[in-house]
DNA sequence: ATACATTATGGGTAGTTGTGGGTAATTATA
DNA sequence: TATAATTACCCACAACTACCCATAATGTAT
C-alpha cells in the first residue's frame, strides 16, 4: 500500500512472451487506482519506448488534446501522432497486458524489456535502446539537468 | 523522542542478511513521523550509497516532478534518472527494510553496512567505500569549507 | 543484581508473483 | 460458409516475498 495512487517509480526487468504479453509489476498494479478497472492506455512514447498511462489519466490527456486548435499544423500532427497508436488494454489474471505489434515494432522490443515508473506513467523499453538514449541525453543536457536538480532535489 | 521529526543524525553499524534486509536503527524509527506509515523511499545516492527518504518527504519530490512536461527532452531524462531506482519500502515488525538487488549492487553492499543520519534523509554505505570517499573529500581545500561557513552557522 | 523490555539477527512458511503454455471464443480471410 | 488466424481466458508451477516466530544481545527499571 502506497500513499500516492497512479504514481509509479522504480525499474523492473521483465520478459515479453511469444504472444506479446508483458507483466505489469505487482507494485505498479497495487499503485493503480481502482477506478482504472485494471486498464492502461498504451501508446508511442516520446523516445523509442512504449508509454502506459492509467486509463483515467489518459482521459484527462484526451481532454487537453481537445483544447488544441486544429487550425495549427503543428497541433494537428501532434494530436494525430499521440492518439494514433493509443489503445486501451486491461491486464489479465496473471497481471499481464498485451502490447500491440505496432508498438512492439516501434519500441524495438524483444524478449527482454525494462519497465520504468515515470511518476504519472510507465515506460517500457528495449534495454539496449534505453542505454543509448540515456547516454546521449546526459551528454547534451547536463547543464540543464543540473539546473533542474537545484530546483527540485532537497 | 527528538524535537524534530523526520530528522536523522548519528552513525550505526548493521548487518545485511541473506535476504537483503537491513535494520533501520530504533532511534531513526522513532524519529520517523507517523504519517509515513513506517515507510521510506530508497534510491541511488549521489556517491555510491543508498539514500532513504521518509515516504512523505519523497512524496513532495514526486509532486514537483509531476509538474515537468514530458515534451521536454531534458525533463524526461531528469525524471527518469531521479525515479528509476526509487522504491517505497515499509519496515517489518522487526524494523527491517528490504533493499532491492539493484541498489545492493550499486552501493556494493555486503554483510557489513553503515547507516548514517543525514538530517532529512538516511545513507546506507559499504564501510570501505565510505572511507575512501571520505578521504578523498577531506583533501578538498578548506576555502570551500569557508564558503559554506558563510551560509550556515554552527 | 535481577527481572523485564527492547533490539538486532536468523530462519520457516504460506501466499503472491512471474512465466509458460493450453483451449475456447472471436475475428478475419478465402 | 468454411477455414485460418487472432484474441481472451484458464491452468500449472517455480521462484520469490511478506509475514511470522525464535533467540541472543542489549538496554532499563526496580
Image (spheres, coloured by chain):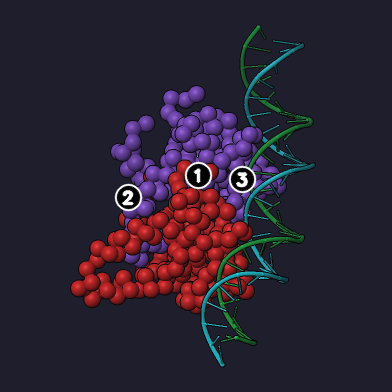
Chain colours: A red, B purple, C cyan, D green
The image position of residue A49, as x and y in percent, is 46, 69
| Residue at left offset 55%, top offset 64% | A97
Q: Name the residue under label 1.
A: A2
Q: Do the residues labelled 2 and 3 touch (CB within 8 Å)?
A: no
| Residue at left offset 59%, top offset 38% | B91
The image position of residue B70, as x and y in percent, is 36, 62
The earlier-in-sequence mark between 1 and 2 is 1
Q: Are marks 3 and 1 in contact (CB under 8 Å)?
A: no
**Within-10-Å neighbours for mark 2: few <14, some 14–19, many 20+:** few
**Given the image, what chain letter belongs to the residue carrying mark 2?**
A
| Residue at left offset 48%, top offset 31% | B34
Q: Give the number of callouts.
A: 3
- Relative height, residue C1 to residue A90 (above, below): above
Residue furthest out toward the left: A71
| Residue at left offset 34%, top offset 57% | A60
Using residue A104 as the reference point, say whether residue B98 is left or right of it: right
The image position of residue A59, as x and y in percent, is 37, 59
Q: Quarter of the image holding residue B72?
A: bottom left
Label ID, residue A151: 2
Do the dots labelled 3 and 1 sit on one chain?
Answer: no
Using residue C20 as the reference point, say whether residue B104 is left or right of it: left
Q: How far apart are marks 2 and 3 (CA)?
A: 30 Å
The image position of residue B95, as x and y in percent, is 61, 35
Q: Is mark 3 on a helix, strand or loop?
A: strand
**Given the image, what chain letter belongs to the residue carrying mark 1?**
A
Q: Which of B148 and B94 is in front in this view?
A: B94
Label ID, residue B98: 3
Q: Which of B22 and B142 is in front in this view?
A: B22
Is residue B88 something that shows in the picture?
Answer: yes
- Relative height, residue A52 to residue A70 (above, below): above
Amino acid at each position: 500500500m502506497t500513499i500516492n495512487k497512479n504514481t509509479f517509480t522504480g525499474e523492473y526487468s521483465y520478459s515479453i512472451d511469444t504472444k506479446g504479453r508483458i507483466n505489469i509489476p505487482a507494485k505498479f498494479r497495487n499503485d493503480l487506482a481502482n477506478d482504472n478497472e485494471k486498464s492502461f492506455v498504451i501508446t508511442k512514447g516520446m523516445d523509442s519506448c512504449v508509454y502506459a498511462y492509467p486509463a483515467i489519466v489518459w482521459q484527462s490527456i484526451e481532454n487537453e488534446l481537445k483544447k488544441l486548435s486544429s487550425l495549427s499544423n503543428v497541433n494537428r500532427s501532434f494530436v494525430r501522432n499521440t492518439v494514433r497508436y493509443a489503445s486501451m488494454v486491461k491486464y489479465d489474471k496473471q497481471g499481464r497486458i498485451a502490447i500491440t505489434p505496432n508498438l512492439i515494432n516501434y519500441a524495438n522490443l524483444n524478449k527482454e524489456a525494462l519497465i520504468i515508473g515515470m511518476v504519472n506513467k510507465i515506460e517500457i523499453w528495449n534495454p539496449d535502446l534505453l542505454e543509448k538514449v540515456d547516454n546521449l541525453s546526459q551528454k547534451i543536457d547536463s547543464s540543464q539537468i543540473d539546473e533542474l536538480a537545484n530546483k527540485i532535489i532537497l
